[in-house]
Image: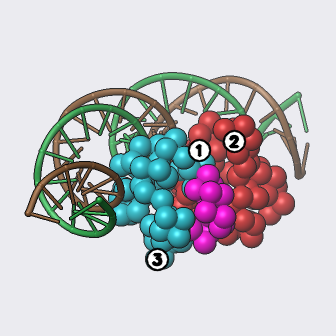
Chain colours: A cyan, B red, C brown, D green
Amino acid sequence: MKNLVKVERARLDWTQAQLAEELGVSRQTIHAIEKNKFNPSVILAIKMAKLFNVTVEELFSIEQE
Amino acid sequence: MKNLVKVERARLDWTQAQLAEELGVSRQTIHAIEKNKFNPSVILAIKMAKLFNVTVEELFSIEQE
DNA sequence: TCATAATGTAAAGTATTGTTTACTTTTAGT
DNA sequence: ACTAAAAGTAAACAATACTTTACATTATGA
């Protein structure tokens, strides 16, 4: 798993805290996702993708496996 | 949350067990997803969408929050 | 340089996803 | 009607997403 959350967030010039707020999750959740500590739910992924105006597949990609 | 897993599975004429096997999860997981018992991980959602040849957003949609 | 915001990290706790087993009900074919 | 496969349901368990709190480190600006 690989994701462009940090990149897309940077494009909007948002902090982790702002993004978290916007999505209704904690800042640590954003941090953990950016660091690939875990694999978010599809709902959260869809909300994020929508916010960033990209598709889920663009935002998250499965590398091997 | 709403999803078209059952519909897409029907289009391929697959059983829950076949789909589960294909995705490397249990049949109960497929059943639970079809019944909206839970909100799968984005990895599983991406794998499913790929199998069905649709986008994650087509397969899963957020209704109200 | 000093202060403050932003990010990184960690650990304990809660909620939810996903597994396993097992049994019931429905569907489909003969 | 009988049989077998498929789907529904349920409950106990394991794994992991996500929260909360707290503190350390790095970036940014006055």
Do the residues marked 3 and 2 share a common chain? no
Marks 3 and 2 sit apart, C-alpha to C-alpha, by: 28 Å
Marks 1 and 2 sit apart, C-alpha to C-alpha, by: 8 Å
Left or right of C26 in this view: A44: left
Q: Position of residue A20 (x, y in %)?
A: 47, 48
**Mark 3–mark 2 CB contact (< 8 Å):** no
Left or right of A35 in this view: A8: right
**Mark 1–mark 2 CB contact (< 8 Å):** yes
Q: Is residue A56 magenta?
A: yes
Which residue, given by chain and number where applicable, does mark 1 sit on?
A: B39
Dominant SS of magenta comes to helix
Q: Circle 2 sits in a helix, a strand or a loop, which is it?
A: loop
Occupied quadrant, residue D20: top left
Q: Where are the magenta residues, as a range?
A: A46-60
Image: A10 above or below D3: below
Q: At 62% from the left edge and 36% from the top edge, which residue is drawn?
A: B37
Q: At 59% from the left edge and 40% from the top edge, which residue is drawn?
A: B38
Q: Circle 1 sits in a helix, a strand or a loop, which is it?
A: loop
Marks 1 and 3 sit apart, C-alpha to C-alpha, by: 23 Å
Q: Label 1: chain? A: B
Q: Say which of B4 and B58 sits in front.
A: B58
Q: Label 3: chain? A: A
Q: At 72% from the left edge and 49% from the top edge, which residue is drawn?
A: B61
Q: Which callout, 1 or 2, points at the residue further toward the start of the chain?
A: 2
Which residue, given by chain and number where applicable, does mark 2 sit on?
A: B1
Q: Say which of C19 and B65 sits in front.
A: B65
Q: Position of residue B11 (x, y in %)?
A: 84, 60
Which residue, given by chain and number where applicable, does mark 3 sit on?
A: A64
Q: Say which of B38 and C1 sits in front.
A: C1
Name the kind of residue labelled 1 in the image: Asn
